[in-house]
Amino acid sequence: MSIPFSLEGKRGIVLGIANRHSIAYGCAEVLSELGAELCITYLNEKSKPFVAPLAEKLSTALFLPCDVSKAGELEAVFKEAEKQWGTIDFVVHSIAWSPLDELHGRLVDSSSQGFGMAMDISCHSFIRTARLSEALMKDNGGTLITMTYYGSEKVVDHYGMMGPVKAALESSVRYMASELGESGIRVHSVSPGPMPTRAGSGITDFDGLMDDAVTRSPLHRLGSPDDVGRLTAFLISDWASSQTGSQLFVDAGHHIMA
């Protein structure tokens, strides 16, 4: 593959890798291939054996635990990044969670506690990430990217409370792009279509969702984590220096179809 640009000299954090099929890993792999230096996180000791070989393969500079629902863990990642590098150039945030039974149920039946936890982990953790990033990007700017989904705009069966949560995340991207622009920090959301990831497998009839995407998308195929990684790399690169506040789809055009 010919390389249209390089990310040599750029350093950043990738949050949310669960295994080699993760969208976050597709991003990390492409960013590493283009020369970026990475800090990769894993959720907990149970997930560490699945992520450690990936971090080793990519020769990551930092490999750290990060459960955003636990006080201090996200902050510790940024403290180590500052100690290692001083500054960072990007963060890729690929974290989402909701109680499984409430994800499959009706929104109107969701509990206050379940909805609040889903919002905190899936949305507010990106806001916290932006606040922590600002201190390490204040001199040279940088790029913040989070992952969303079409279910924020249209009703998708069995997506439940995550639809409103992702809508809040997308709105947060726009507000933070406005607030952080003066510091040269660009903020984007990337919206992959259905992909065979662990997160996707938690949605009821996810195979049917993928089949529909292949059938109805203009390109009649699914996107891949590598496709997401290539778009993410472009947004991080200097080639996208005039873009911020965007929501960009990686779904073979599925989102345009009625």
Image (cartoon, helix red, strand yellow):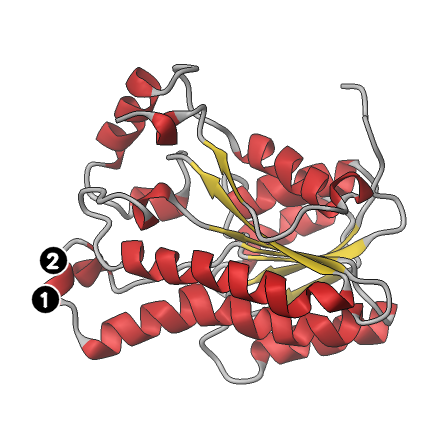
Q: Amino acid at mark 2?
A: Arg
For the C terminus, the quadrant is top left
Q: Secondary structure at mark 1?
A: helix
| Residue 67 shows in the view | no
Residue 104 vertical position relative to residue 155 in the rendered view, above or below: below
Identify which residue, 147 or 225, lies in the foreground.
Answer: 147
Numbered mark located on residue 109 in the image? 1
Give percent across and percent down for residue 4.
81, 26
Q: Position of residue 184 (x, y in %)?
A: 77, 62
Residue at (17% x, 53% y) in the render:
104
**Number of marks drawn:** 2
Residue 17 % position (x, y) = 55, 52
In-front residue for pair 210/243? 243
**From mark 2 to mark 1, how far is it between C-alphas?**
5 Å
Label 2: few (<14), some or many (≥20) within 10 Å? some
Is residue 7 depicted above or below 209 in this figure? below
Instruction: Please tell me how crowded label 1 is: few (under 14), some (14-19), or many (20+) other residues with Cα within 10 Å.
Output: few
Q: Is residue 119 above or below residue 192?
A: below
| Residue 57 falls left or right of residue 95 | right
User: In the rendered image, which residue does mark 2 sit on?
Assistant: 106
Which residue reaches farthest bottom?
71
Q: Amino acid at mark 1?
A: Asp
Task: Tell me which corner region of the image, top left, top right, bottom left or bottom right, holds residue 151.
Answer: top left
Assess whether mark 1 and mark 2 are in contact (beta carbons under 8 angstroms). yes
At 44% from the left edge and 30% from the top edge, which residue is drawn? Answer: 251
